[in-house]
Image (tube, rainbow, N blue to C red):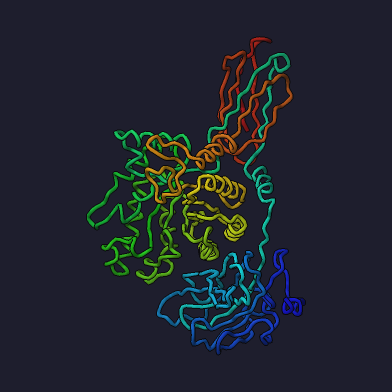
Amino acid sequence: MFRVIFFAFLVYTVYGETNLFINGDFETTTYDGSDWYCQGNCKLTASTDSRSGQNSVLVTERNKLWKGAAQRLDLIGGERYKITAYVKLLQLNNNKQYQEIKLTMKCKNSAGKTVYFGFGTTPLVFPGEWFQVGGVHKTDEGSTDCRIYIATDVNTDYLLDDAEAIHIPVNDAWRDEAKQRIEELRKDNIRIRLSGDNVNTSMVHIQLQQTKMKFPLGSVMNADKIVDTEDASNLRYQQVFYENFEWGVLGNALKWKQMQPRVDKVIADKPLNAMLAMKEHGIKQRCHCAFWGVDDRVQDWVKQLDAESLKAAVFERINNVTALTDGMCEHWDVNNEMLHGDFYERSTKDITITPQMFSKMNQLDPDAALYLNDYNVLNNGITTVALKEAGQKFKDFGAPIGGIGVQGHMHGIDIPLMKARLDILEEAGLNVMITEFAINEEDDGIKAQNVEDTLTLFFSHPAVEGVLFWGFWDGRIWEPLAPLFNGPDVTPNAAGKVYQNIFHNEWRTRAYQTLLGEEPFEVRGFMGDYSLTVSYQGVTLATQTFSLTGSGQDVDIQLNGEPGSPSVSNIVTN
């Protein structure tokens, strides 16, 4: 700790938190080892090509991938930290249009052995632009003498600026704070009043019932099981889905490899019939996915195409699939997991191919919001910063991006880490959809608590717009420890009961009230769709539907008739 105290005058504050990097803004240009040093026989010099302020540091003469700017940090073992920095490549040297940058931590463990930990990886980095790298992680117990450094694919020169290392404390009051945010973010005011000649003499009863949530809660569905009418367990599967979810997504049937395994074979009826079945039940749909750039997810005939033929096939695929799904997709995953698979960039030799996919899909299906979708973002955190950077870059390039999809296959929940990672994603200024949510726990009680906690965190975060489970029934699910429902009767387990209570009760608004006179009835309700019923002595006088979306809702019930025999001439909502 002496080193931190000795150089305390160089430590500055970022967003109200103390930055543990000394000279993290690189405005001091000596680099004498008291702050930044060059790991290995490389060279650090000041540069006025900075992301902010007056200076950055230029790193040259690197002949090993691990050689570069580094600094020792006095981190505490078993604590959580956000560590990030901005890097600008000056060249590539690998005959590619891009490379990968890693922020790595090297520490001594409790046995005194050197261990390495990847704090964050940002792929698809091209020269001439600043890219952030890093992440949010918990250090291993007993870690000491930790050093942070930047590694690249090849021995290129780079600039480094705006480095920050921030301690993330545990917040024991997070649930109370989350509930307060939910009250502010997810609810709105409803004001109901009577008008007309008989408002002071006629009593009516109102019943307010929320019928849909604005916040999507849904699940992946199997295209065969959602339409099967023969198997009793599948019928029960459909019933439970329609009763407990409002959004759906097909797991495989819309993927290009499944829809067109050969150039001369297109399987369109399977996804179309499943989508039509969900549409008939009022289910909003997330379409997954137009492309998937991970090599083993690309069909062989596509791999054999040259660059120009591949581009032509990509645009033909977009034409065909958007025509098939016309008007049914609320969201589209465009190029799935592009941070982990660069087939299309590599094979077309065009780093802009995914933004081109976005533009073409937006042209043909302008009502669908288009998403990046990736993993190792929430529960792992290696690509949290990278996904945020991709979203920002797409916006900067003018690509019609509608949001960020975050896969959430989880085991061992750490709320402070997840909250900090969501905060990073929020910096992109895009909606965040939790697209593949699953809690994998053997213990039903632990799983139930984790489902409640993570859903509470998601619902309370301003960037998160919805959650889709990656399956709910053990008769059809990818991860065997994740189901909410079990057995041929599709019966809720402990986690399923927690979810059902959240979906049907905790995050729903119902109100019953007797109205007499002009005094309005006011209620703060969860945003979504509502049905209002007006009755007198058990007889329904009128019904009205409306949506609560964030700007408040006034409801004026206009009464006619004689005292003791009211009627409703109109219900005005605005």
Q: Is residue 406 above or below residue 50?
A: above
Q: Position of residue 276 (x, y in %)?
A: 36, 39
Position of the C terminus by quadrant: top right
Q: Is residue 153 left or right of residue 80?
A: left
Q: Position of residue 540 (x, y in %)?
A: 57, 17
Q: Residue furthest left?
A: 264
Q: Is residue 116 above or below residue 361?
A: below
Please tell me which residue lies in front, 150 or 189. Answer: 150
Q: Position of residue 19 (x, y in %)?
A: 69, 70
Q: Residue at x 58, y 17 (%)?
A: 541
Q: Is residue 164 left or right of residue 249?
A: right
Q: Is residue 396 visible?
A: no
Q: Is residue 115 above or below residue 353?
A: below
Please tell me which residue lies in front, 4 or 494. Answer: 494
Q: Is residue 259 left or right of residue 236?
A: left
Q: Is residue 289 visible?
A: yes
Q: Is residue 438 above or below residue 36?
A: above
Position of the N terminus by quadrant: bottom right
Q: Position of residue 566 (x, y in %)?
A: 64, 13
> Hey, which quadrant is residue 283 in on the image?
top left
> Hey, which quadrant is residue 75 in on the image?
bottom right
Q: Residue furthest front?
A: 111
Q: Is residue 367 left or right of residue 45?
A: left
What count of labels does the image hold?
A: 0
Please tell me which residue lies in front, 520 or 73. Answer: 73
Q: Residue at x 42, y 80 (%)?
A: 94
